[in-house]
Amino acid sequence: MKLITTLLLLISMNTFAQSYADLIAKHREAYKEDFIKDSHSPLQKNDLQNLHFYEADSNYKVLAAVELLKNEKVFKMPTFNGSSSDYYRYAHINFSLKGKAIQMTLYRSVALSTNPVYNDHLFLPFTDETNHKETYGGGRYIDLDAKEINNNHIEIDFNKAYNPYCAYSDGYRCPVPPEENDLQLAIKAGEKRYTGEKKHHE
């Protein structure tokens, strides 16, 4: 009986791993398609072969406790081209990853918050120890939705971390991840370094 239970557990775990990998694969296909659909995209269809990703790993999907911040003042988040964009700190999130207790900050764009379509958009930029080695040196981003906060918790999936447009081309105003979101560990999940030639955007 114990053997059967163990086998069933292994099968269910394997099925979960497969279905999760399928889910991430679909997410990445949609991500690639968006480059082709977006008229402002730095990449064309033949550039997509130069996009690379870590294998899906559900260990990098965490449930984070959310602490909403109040009376936060708007601040200017620097961008890679020397300008800045207006943001405010929306919440602190706390979770454990690879045995480390981590706190990060979620941001909200002032410009996007005035657009009904993006009113609930939350921005999670970060840097980690894979930067300049396996991933883009300027860090990566994760998009979240305020409606995803449930019972003061939100799911953070680093498998969905992606590169800013500045990883592929100059001429874009990509926010620089603030120091408070510099993680002292290697996040081997999400998008890796782009291996194509960097473009020059007019």
Image: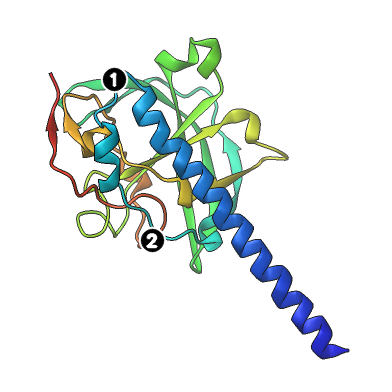
Disc number lying in front (2 or 1): 1
**190 w.r.t. 98: above or below:** above
The residue singled out by tag 2 in the image is: 188
> For the residue marked with disc 2, what is the amino acid?
Lys
* Quadrant of the image occupied by residue 41: top left
The residue singled out by tag 1 in the image is: 40
Q: Nearer the viewer, residue 178 or 170?
A: 170
The number of numbered badges drawn on the structure is: 2
User: Split into 4 quadrants, where in the image is the C terminus?
Assistant: top left
Assess disc 2: are there few (<14), some (14-19) or many (≥20) residues with their C-alpha within 10 Å of its C-alpha.
many
Residue 94 percent across, percent down from the top left:
54, 50
85 displayed left or right of 201: right
* Identity of the residue drawn at 60% across and 62% down: 18
Q: Nearer the viewer, residue 36 or 139?
A: 36
Residue 66 percent across, percent down from the top left:
60, 41
Residue 111 percent across, percent down from the top left:
40, 14
